[in-house]
Amino acid sequence: MHIPDGYLGPATYGTMYGAMIPFWVLASRKLNKTFKAKQAPYLALGAAFSFVIMMFNIPIAGGTTGHATGAALIAILLGPWAAIIAVSVALIIQALLFGDGGITAIGANCFNMAAVGSLAGYGIYRFVAAGSDAKSRRRLIAGAVAAYVSLNASALLAAVQLGIQPLIERSPEGQPLYSPYPLSIAIPAMAMGHLLLFGFVEAAVTALVLKYLQKNAPEMIT
Amino acid sequence: MTTVKKLWIAIGILALLSPLGLIIPALFGAGGAWGEWGLEEMKKLVGYIPEGMQRFAHIWKSPMPDYTLPGQQQGLAIESLGYVLSAIVGIAATAGVVYLITKMLGRKNGTD
């Protein structure tokens, strides 16, 4: 789901940078107000987890691969604003050091995975878990559902950003200038893998870590 | 052992297991992720390389592209080593940057 350089035209990648910057600013402000220094190790852990979990490429029928992001999990444990920062840093380092995801696409990739992944994951978790005890099974279900839905939201957004390119970025002869696959191909392609497999992986990882923390460090589950 | 330490050990284990992200797709003959093809693969898929993509694709040269060690190496073993080293470098860089950011941002909120 890491959109590379060359797949999005300037209209799109510029817009996505514009869309993401307010989230970075807001997240920094929120953290400045509420984050306690003692939480720093946990956020570093979360960001590291996000980085490494994105290296686990999972194959799916059709010959492509996908991966989890950890955004929902970090948002559940540390709040969505901290998660936005954590996942953004992971994504930016992936782009800069490893060429995983384009430089021009940093805004888009962060918006899809860090912002939407974290906020949707957090919101859904809070909604499903409402009123339940921190050690209850409902928290695990909430985490799993939040992870599944938020990852698919991220994937859908990426698919839309890619899919509109043939529409809005064409050469004078009508040839696509960037990603050549339209929405009718991009959406099913991205949605299938994430609905059928990668979403479940994200859900399982999230639930498993939550379960471990429920047992061994319940104070981390607010 | 503190929870933080245990979790870092878990991250370390994940880093060591990261070559699975290379090996398992290879076993299944899977390529890369959808929408993450290189220029040659793009040409094979649609018969041409979109102009804009050609222009932007190499706009940035990363030191460890696709989690490989610098320099041309082939073979699953070397690539797996590259993966593990990349994981370690990436984890250190990511954690380091985030740690700095949060220390700066959370400084005035106390340490309770």
Image: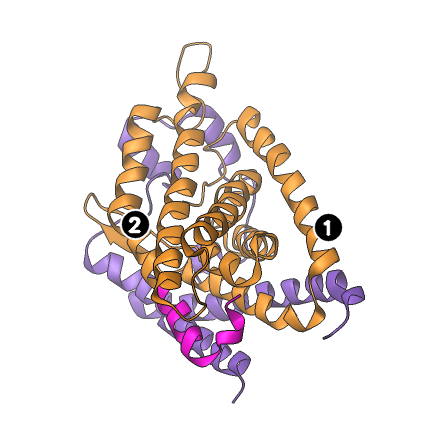
Marks 1 and 2, how far apart at CA: 36 Å
User: Residue A25's x, y, as percent?
Assistant: 70, 45
Dot 1: element: helix
Residue B70 visible in image = no
Q: Colour of chain B?
A: purple
Which span is picked out in magenta? Answer: A207-222
User: Residue B38: which quarter of the image?
Assistant: top left
Q: Quadrant of the N terminus of chain A?
A: top left
Query: Which residue does the numbered mark 1 point to in the structure image?
Result: A29
Q: Secondary structure at mark 2?
A: strand
> Which chain is the one coloured orange?
A
Which mark, by number, is residue A65? 2
Please tell me which residue lies in front, A61 or A153.
Answer: A153
Subunit of label 2: A
Asked if residue A159 is positioned above or below residue B29 in the image, the reply reads above
Instruction: Left or right? Give the position of A27 relative to A33.
Output: left
- Residue furthest bottom as drawn: B1
Earlier residue among tags 1 and 2 = 1
